[in-house]
Image (tube, rainbow, N blue to C red):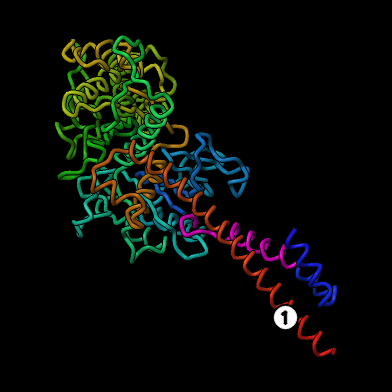
Amino acid sequence: HGFMHARCNWEERIPIEISNSILLSSFIFPSIAYLAAMVTPSPSSSEIYLAAIEGGGTTFVVSVARVLPPSKDDEAPTSSSASSSSSEILRIGPQTLEILQTATIPPKHSTTGEILHLTPHQILEETCTFLRSHVPSSGQYSAVGIATFGPAGVDPQSTEDYGTILSGSPKKEWRNVDLLSPIAEACGLSSDLDRVGFDTDVNAPALAEFRHRSYQLAQSQTKNPSTPSSSSSSSQSSKPLTSLSYVTIGTGVGVGLIINSQPIHGLLHPEGGHVAVRPLEGDTFTGYSWGAEKSPYGGVGTVEGVTSSVALTERYLQMHNEKEGDDDDAAAALKSDAQTREVLATLPDTHDVWSHAANAIANLCVSLLLLTSCQKIVLGGGIMKRTVLYDAVRKRTWELLNGYLDSVDELSAVEKLDDVIVEGSWESMGSGLVGAFALALDAHENATGDDNEDFVEENETLQDRAVMEEKRTDDIEQQQQQSFTSGVLAGIGLSFRCMLISSLFGHGRRRQGR
């Protein structure tokens, strides 16, 4: 009412055009301020682009992703959050990534399906070309993660071999090859190596699995805070997750370990695939050919020496020769299959080779439970696509433990092992590649100090990180609300200043007219 009364008085003193402009300005300035407050990006919402490389001895998988803004929702962001509706969404704990580009180097032949053989130098050159062709407009990636086969130099303090394949590798042409330097250069990070994460292709997936499962557990406990009773039939543990092992069984066998919420390195990194196992009764297998040079125990009676794809195929060859006789032609044909391991896909689930595989993997699980007391053992890799192995491994693990750990609730019954020995979360995408993205995420957090400093100094678990991530989301929303409020107030102030100036201007013209 006061404003309208004042307007009537002003209209008697100044032209109607100026009066209308005053009213119009009172709406325009707040609107401009509102838009400015909403579209001005805050520093915490700047885009993060990551590169990830899963390094194998035959092929490399390289990928580029964008980290999407944090969301309180458990579901993946809608397509409006992504640059393309066809892009793939990856969740690692509280983080959501939009996969932009992915390539396998070298690719399979379009007709034969065979993989072209490239030298290590050629593979690295093709990988770096891919990374350069997709580099962000800033000229560098926010961070890069490299998850490689081992043994590899993973200690940043060891300047001589950090980022290289060590001389003990069974893959001779890769020995002493430097992976880190050319990849860091291609990503624009040669002078910023803190933004490069480098670890084995089993420690990296272990980290990803640990982050993801810890976050899921924290979310579950937040939504269902009631403490389960001791009589509950569920095998789901209510304890915070602080330890996990990731085991991949493929061409070789690798073991990654997270203990007290941190990846294990020590003298080098875990090499659990080479621990000795108790063979099944009557086993006459003489060991796999790859173990002859530099493998512990000569590759005889070890997890990798029994259950790797190379060992299983060579066991099949030995069993075939013992059954059919030493036919040179048949042996030569099967030897070719042994190199490609394609023969394993033709074997039925009931074939004896899978019993030996399950026994070796179960021996490893028993060793991990007794030595590390880890809460989760995640099994992955090509051999575990033979899904009947999961139940066989759990049953054999229970038999080998022989009741020794029955006092532990999670191990008190064979069916409870379903929640201890579990499948990988990303086998269809490739756990090694997801692990490389987890390394990149950690490298970015380390370089920017984003939640990582407190996490390390206070030895917090990743359950605490989930809470911190939710708090960060709340802080971003609060900052946006404060920006909006400040913008509106500034707009109102500007409008009243305009009104005052316009009034004085009109009054001055009136006096000149007199």
Q: Above or below — where is 412 with respect to 3? A: above
Front residue of 491/250: it is 491
Residue 309: name its quadrant. Answer: top left
Residue 493: name its quadrant. Answer: bottom right
Crowd class of label 1 (few under 14; some 14 to 19; many from 20; radius 10 Å): few
Residue 470: name its quadrant. Answer: top left
> Tag 1, which secondary structure?
helix
**To which residue does mark 1 refer?**
504
**Residue at 38% over, 39% down:** 467
Q: Position of residue 492 (x, y in %)?
A: 64, 64
**Residue at 40% over, 21% down:** 386
Front residue of 508/359: it is 508
Q: Above or below — where is 511 with respect to 181? A: below
Q: Please identify the quadrant where the C terminus is shown.
A: bottom right
Q: Main secondary structure of the magenta part?
A: helix
Question: In the rendered image, is residue 58 in sight?
Answer: no
**Residue at 35% over, 19% down:** 236
The range drawn in magenta is 23-47
Front residue of 266/153: it is 266
Left or right: 8 as drawn, with respect to 212: right
Question: In the rendered image, is residue 99 in sight?
Answer: yes
Q: Above or below — where is 395 with respect to 260? A: above
Asked if the magenta segment contains residue 282, the reply would be no
